[in-house]
Amino acid sequence: MLSSARIPETRAAVGNMSDFSQRFLFDKTDIRGDMVHLDQSYLAVAERYPPAVAKLLGQFLSASVLLGSTIKFDGRLVLQARGAGELKLVVAECRFNGDIRGVARLNGEAASDDFSALLGDGTLVMTIESASGQSYQSLVPLSGENLAACLEFYFLQSEQLATRIWLSSDLQRAGGLLLQQLPRQLVMDPAVRARQWEHVTILAATTTSEELLDLAPAALLQRLYVEDPVRLTDLKPIQFQCSCTPARTANALVLLGQDEVDDLFDELPKVVIDCEFCGHQYTFTKDSLAETLRAGEVSH
């Protein structure tokens, strides 16, 4: 049970942070949870897209943070969906330090609020890349009615961990809640574990989208679990940060092939490349491209 005397009611009252995640634990159970709130980092990604796409991106970004909270890693987690609907691709990336970014590629006009209409029949891919270069990838079909349902199926299929996820976003904010039953450590009795899991998930299912977006984590948990002992950990800051650099962009241009790059500069004095994630423009002449590539090799 949380002490109501020191609980901030709204997310705006949580310190000076507008974008953060926070873990919580239920005492005497093997159940943990995480919440995420995104404001500025979400707007930095979503402001370039139509409303329906912006809302979906908010859910993907929130989900990437929640998924990252379930594992220990020193690299990045990438959540992407490739579909055949109004969107070709949606990508959300979360790094271990709280940096996030995202992008969507439209297949014509994307105006539907329906998950299946936006993505159609496709595949949801989660990739975990460590700083050492090792990677792990899981794929599940986009068969759920929303992103949360697809992710819950992933955990059931791949991790064998009971997991519930709630995601919400409007055109200003995004957020999410995750509950997960951990392997047996404190509670060994299967019947007791089942009752505890049923209890916390039934109460969590009463959460409205408005509460998920408006309330500070402690305030929401106090409303949901007024009689249950819940412990909150420290806030983890989340921020939008793109990893694009001149060297990486130059290397991407070179991947076109030397002949095609030469043809580009024969036709144009300058080549301008926009970063899909942040919109930053990189301008190269033939000479500056070579200089950037040489500088990248030296720094590497």
Image (cartoon, helix red, strand yellow):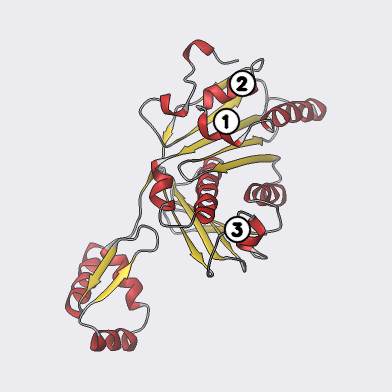
Q: Residues within 10 Å of mark 2 (few under 14, many from 20)?
A: some
Q: Residues within 10 Å of mark 3 (few under 14, many from 20)?
A: few
User: What residue type is disc 1 on?
Assistant: Glu
Report the side of 231 relative to 103 (left or right): right
User: What residue type is disc 3 on?
Assistant: Ser
Say which mark, if any, is on residue 112: 3
Report the side of 154 relative to 247 (left or right): right
Is residue 2 visible from the viewing direction of this image?
Answer: yes
Q: Which residue appears farthest toward the right when viewing the image? A: 191
Residue pointed to by mark 2: 223
Decide which of 126, 130 is in the foreground and name it: 126
Where residue 31 appears, x then y in whole percent? Answer: 65, 30
Q: Label 3: state its secondary structure.
A: loop
Q: Which residue appears farthest toward the top when viewing the image? A: 5
Q: Label 2: state its secondary structure.
A: helix
Identified at 35% across, 54% down, the residue is 242
Nearer mark to the viewer, of 3 and 2: 3
Disc 1 and disc 3 in contact, CB within 8 angstroms: no
Q: Is residue 147 above or below residue 254?
A: above
